[in-house]
Image (cartoon, rainbow, N blue to C red):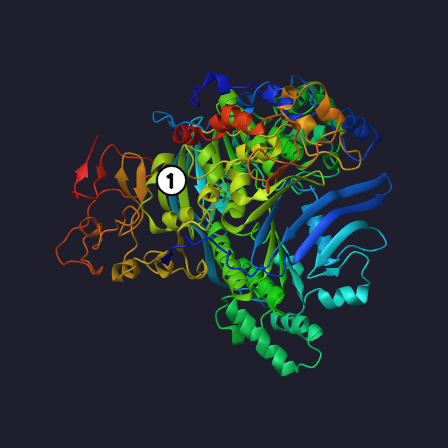
Amino acid sequence: MTQDPNADAQVAPTEVGANAAESGERQLTPEASDAYASHEVPGDRPHSVAELGHAASRLDPDAPAVLTVDNLKMYFPVRSSGVVRRTIGHVQAVDGISFEVPKGGSLGLVGESGCGKSTTGRLITRLYKPTGGSMMFEGNDLAKLSNKEMKPLRRDVQMIFQDPYTSLNPRHTVGTIVGAPLEVHKIVPKNQVLSRVQELLEVVGLNPEHYNRYPNEFSGGQRQRIGIARALTLNPKVLVADEPVSALDVSIQAQVVNLLQDIQREFDVAFLFIAHDLAIVRHFCPEIAVMYLGKIVEIGDRETIYSRPHHPYTQALLSAVPDVKQAAVGGRRERIRLEGDVPSPINPPSGCRFRTRCQFAQEICAKVEPPLLQIGKRHKVACHFAGELGAHPATPVTTELLGVDDQGSPVPGATPSNTQLTIPGYEKTWYDLHTKQTTGV
Amino acid sequence: MTSVPMTQSSMSEGSASEGPLLVVEDLKVTFPTEDGPVTAVSGLSYSVERGKTLGIVGESGSGKSVSSMAVMGLHDAKSAQISGSIRVGGTELVGLNESKMRALRGNSMAMIFQDALAALHPFYKIGKQLEEAYLVHHSSASKRDARRKAIEMLDRVGIPQPDRRVDDYPHQFSGGMRQRAMIAMGLINDPALLIADEPTTALDVTVQAQILDLLQDLQREFNSAVIIITHDLGVIAEMADDVLVMYAGRCVEYGTVKQILTAPEMPYTWGLLSSVPDVLASTDARLIPIPGNPPSLLRPPSGCSFHPRCVHSDKVPGDLCSTELPPLLPASVGAAHLRRCHLADPSAVYQSEVLPEIAPDLVEETR
């Protein structure tokens, strides 16, 4: 178990399910009225508020990586109209991203719509075949495998989808939906499928007797639980959760997030958690990567990203989140306004992709792309002027490493540092922004 | 990208001399269905002054949209039974005939919808849709005036090159621009009352911040009364002056934004606050969901409609919670703060039990 050691916060999944009261009700049917009429939360009533709560997930710095993504790229061709559909360009949805997902841990992927975070999730589950790069999982490069070779590995990498209304087949019963992976992969004999399905339904807090009901008979939160049960059917080692709670009501979101935390503890599953809600990601993921226009601009542990972000985009993103605590002060929080829209990924800006909206952008930003430079123990940032809010340096910090001058032109005779700048994990040593030297622990 | 200090308390400079612009009293909306009547809203009362913002919070099905659609007169008179009173600028809207309603709708009151792509007509140019909204209420205006007005409004809401973009179709706009176009359409006739139903829910945070800034700027300029419907308490905290918390068709808590978000006195509001993580809070804060699901309005729970999901009902003597609907009474502090709960001293429960779990850092501060 790599997560929260708070023993009192740990609630067994089944108990959560019972508390969640999601087991009994059925809508728009005669039984439904009965279930509603009783208005009882099945199972033990929670006795204190705390019993229901889960604190944020904790980071285990020593966990080995279960998935290593290196320089992953996905270009979608843009074709001209007409009979001969020539390729006239590429949407660079994901353009060279590298990260590691720790075993049993979770990495959060945040960014605005169109930044490539969902594409990344779909690449890892191999719903798309990447244009380039590698995705190492237990000695296999998922990026290179054929669909046939991929099939046995699909057990280990599963996905939870955003919209529980469209991701479940309305004509299949819950039993068929959750049991399908078992039959496809021939894990258990046919006569045992049902018992495994019921077990899974119980794990996600649904009534196991409801296996022969249809998705339309469940509420949004319950449907998302079905989607989670389906993803868990094959005991995956990596779960890609693409906006798993954004389609749900606020009060239900917390139930599902807590369920995912329980599942992570129970089964030691690693999560790639994709969401645009920065607060949910902060709660669920001890480590977070911020994406902008197909690139990771900043990656680091929760503490660093949320308290000491060094990239101007991360700073703008965080300042834009409305804050409940503002009620005590009144008015709006001071925020960094980003002008305009995200540029087109078909023809992204040269150099740094964020420069068109960045208040610190200078000549070098248009000429040289900033490398994703490790500047702390668990902190990497891709910015020539990386610094804490209000303390961005006046001169680029990357010139010596890249062998360029302050305007971004190559310095004759200078040799760019050989440091591998885009390795997926973290190095033992890093580049200190203040001393401009490589330092270590 | 520029830092803009937004410390000033948003929209307090309104002229409130002539009393509230919108007064809703004892509103009840019932829809007959095959399974029996569904009372989507009952006993709802609130008021909004010009220049002020009311935030309505609640889950889906809590009646927040139904009540605002009643204000706009968007319910089918054949299927919805509306009782109570809705007065806009002194005009009673309940029972008003359709032609009179149509003269008011879009003119003295307007609505911004959540999904701009669905709310804008995909076959018509943005400009045409704006012009139509203008011409309906300005029959003497020429087409050229209407077009000029449309371009002016697009410019006002921050669409770049409005004279060119006016001839675009909705699909050619980005999500944020579509929402801006919707706001332009809502404001084209300078309405005194603007209802924004989840105006930023489908948008990214950076775009959301832009839209909220825009709404505040425009409200200040036109001195309109705004109702903002959302489930995002952060948006409420930054935008609203007053807050109405709805649950199962009823108002369960009503007060100023400070009262509701810093000293809430109703377990459902506590649940909402505890089930939403905060980007700035301590990571020791727990995420505590509200157990169960929102109730069916077809057969609402007896007594307090929140009692099946309430973890504090055992503190109330007897089975009062399940038998008797708590009245909307003034809270322990502040007469303007109303809450619907049987708990004898909810603020003590909040301070001792709820706050330490959801915001451990705040408890330290208050000690």
Work out whether residue A65 or residue B75 is closer to the camera in this orientation and state it: B75
x and y percentages locating residue A15 in the rendered image: 61, 19
Q: Nearer the viewer, residue A413 or A426?
A: A426
Residue in the picture at 27% in, 47% down: A387
SS state under label 1: helix
Residue A37, located in which quarter of the rendered image? top right
Q: Nearer the viewer, residue B19 or A205?
A: B19
In the image, B252 versus B47, the foreground residue is B47
Quadrant placement of the N terminus of chain A: top left
Q: Position of residue B195 (x, y in %)?
A: 63, 56
Q: Quadrant of residue A234?
A: top right
Identify residue for label 1. A306
Residue A15 visible to the viewer: yes
Query: Is any part of residue A22 visible from this angle?
Result: no
The answer to whether residue B66 is left or right of residue A376 is right
Is A336 situated above or below B328? below
Chain bearing mark 1: A
Residue placed furthest toward the left:
A413
Residue appearing at x 56%, y 55% in the figure: B52
Tell me which amino acid carries mark 1: Tyr
**Quadrant of the image containing the C terminus of chain A:** top left
The image quarter in which residue B314 lies = top right
| Residue drawn at x 71%, y 78% as measured from the top left | B139
Relative to B216, is A31 above or below?
above
